[in-house]
Amino acid sequence: MDRIVLNTANPLVATITMGEQEFHCEFNELLRCDFPVSAWEPIPVEIPPGNSKSWYERPASKDNGFAKGSNGLIHLPLFRQSNSAPQKTYDEEILTLVAATPVLAIATRSHHIEADHSKFVASSVLLVWASRIAVVISLDGTEGVSTEGAAPHEWHLNASASMKVETAIDELLTRSKVFPSSSSQSLYVAPNCIGQHLLGQPTNPDFGTGSPWLGEWRFDNFGSLAAALSRFRPGLDDFAVHVLPSK
């Protein structure tokens, strides 16, 4: 399933304010947002009908209905840090785009391998819109289970109800604690410059080239992940964004 690229009519600048820090991020493309599970088949982030769906085949299967008929697919801006000053004019196209497109995304991922080599993966993506409304979408997957009576591939996707951005980190933490606390964890942020400001340089700066996830921060356990996510709380309490044309 190829990643869908949507182009804006003109370059845009998102000015994202988190507490006292201001970030200017330019973009002119929107990419389909996939869960950051690079070792697995691409699985798009979506808000499904009824907020949940399950399937029991490989994600890329043409027959499982996963890769088609999904109207709730999420697209994210392909951000790059910019010093460009935005213009001071809005137009109807920009207002429509901002209403429909998340401007901040924070994702977590962890995985677990059993003694029989069955693989389990869990990933949650926190999406924030300019309206300060947030949603957390979670994926739980099992691949390679061959025990009698069990499906070889099992996937469950669930989206939360809309919530205020101030409470979203708690929801993300709850959904991210799937495996034992000692399991390794990964964190991803779009725009990447916000992650670098709060967390320093990514552990893997080459992760996700050509995707909204432009870096990966790795942690040895859930406690370290929780500590990293806590750094986002003050900024999300005072979160604002304006999207305007680039000069």
Image (cartoon, rainbow, N blue to C red):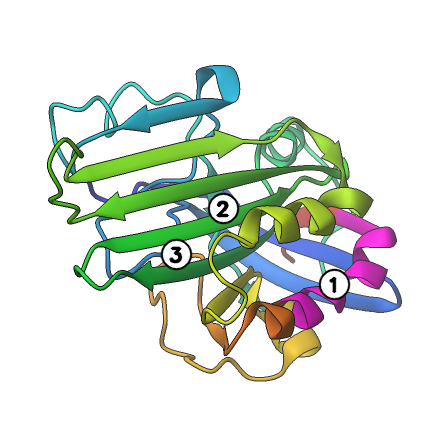
* Label 2 SS: strand
> The N terminus lies in which quarter of the figure?
top left
Q: Earlier in the sequence, mark 2 or mark 3?
A: 3
> The C terminus lies in which quarter of the figure?
bottom right
Residue hosting label 1: 232
Residue nearest the viewer, comparing 211 with 88 = 211
Query: Magenta stretch containing residue 96, yes or no?
Result: no
Q: Label 2 neighbourhood size at 10 Å, few (<14), some (14-19), many (20+)?
A: many
* Label 3 SS: loop
Q: Residue at x 53, y 47 (%)?
A: 125
Residue hosting label 2: 76
Q: Earlier in the sequence, mark 1 or mark 2?
A: 2
Q: Is residue 78 left or right of residue 243?
A: left
Give percent across and percent down for residue 154: 25, 36
Give percent across and percent down for residue 150: 18, 34
Asked if residue 45 can be seen in this view, the reply is yes
Q: Residue at x 22, y 64 (%)?
A: 115
Above or below residue 227? Residue 145 is: above
Mark seen at residue 36: 3
Give percent across and percent down for residue 135: 63, 36
Above or below residue 23? Residue 201 is: below
Q: Looking at numbered disc 3 in the image, what kind of residue is underneath it?
A: Pro
The CA distance from mark 2 to mark 3 is 13 Å
Give residue 184's quadrant in the image.
bottom left
The CA distance from mark 1 to mark 2 is 19 Å
